[in-house]
């Protein structure tokens, strides 16, 4: 199945924030999800019909896990400005592109998050008994997600 060109592996992807020309490496992206809930309405005076009416679309926050980047990285600066700024400056939303790549590094599918901004930041456990890369998580809220490709 992995050798079938119609199937794309989920571990080759790129994340790009804003108008950056190159993306950064990430260990994991989760939360690419939209959901349309419905409301059940029973028709008045007619017991045979029940209508399912759509409610507004819900979007899950997207979480990106990656190795801790240096303080000078633009994503680090943006996250710090947003979460540590105490609203001294307005929140600056950005677009985030998540590109799924094939083995030739061609984009197979892409998801664009519009008006995204960080809402949570955390660092994995620091443990002197483990020999692991330090991983941080940044969670983003956004206004819209569009699948391209």
Image (cartoon, grey):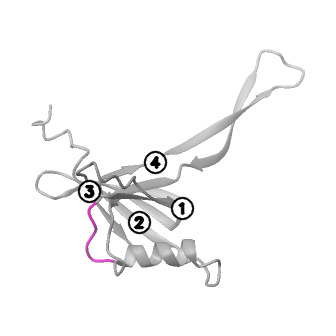
Q: CA distance from mark 2 to mark 3?
A: 24 Å
| Picture residue at 17% right of the left edge, 51% below the top | 102
Q: Are marks 1 and 3 in contact (CB under 8 Å)?
A: no
Residue 143 in magenta stretch: no
| Picture residue at 44% right of the left edge, 69% below the top | 95
Q: Are marks 3 and 4 in contact (CB under 8 Å)?
A: no
Q: CA distance from mark 1 to mark 4?
A: 12 Å
**Which residues are drawn in magenta?**
18-25
Locate the C terminus by quadrant.
Answer: bottom left
Q: CA distance from mark 4 to mark 2?
A: 13 Å
Q: Which numbered tag is attached to residue 133? A: 3
From the viewer's perspective, tell me whether residue 109 is left or right of residue 49.
Answer: left
In the rendered image, which residue does mark 4 sit on? 31
Query: Which type of secondary structure does the marked residue at label 4 adopt?
Result: loop
Q: Which numbered tag is attached to residue 96? A: 2
Query: Which type of secondary structure does the marked residue at label 1 adopt?
Result: loop
């Amino acid at each position: 199945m992995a050798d079938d060109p119609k199937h794309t592996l989920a571990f080759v992807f790129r994340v790009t924030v804003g108008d950056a020309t190159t993306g950064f490496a990430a260990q994991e992206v989760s939360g690419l999800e939209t959901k349309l809930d419905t409301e059940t309405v029973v028709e008045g005076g007619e017991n045979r019909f029940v209508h399912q009416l759509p409610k507004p679309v819900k979007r899950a926050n997207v979480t990106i896990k990656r190795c801790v980047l240096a303080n000078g990285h633009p994503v680090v600066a943006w996250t710090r400005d947003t979460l540590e700024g105490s609203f001294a400056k307005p929140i600056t939303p950005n677009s985030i592109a998540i590109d799924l790549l094939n083995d030739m590094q061609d984009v197979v599918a892409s998801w664009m998050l519009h008006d995204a901004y960080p809402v949570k930041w955390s660092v994995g456990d620091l443990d002197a008994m483990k020999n692991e890369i330090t991983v941080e998580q940044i969670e983003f809220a956004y206004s819209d997600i569009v699948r391209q490709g």
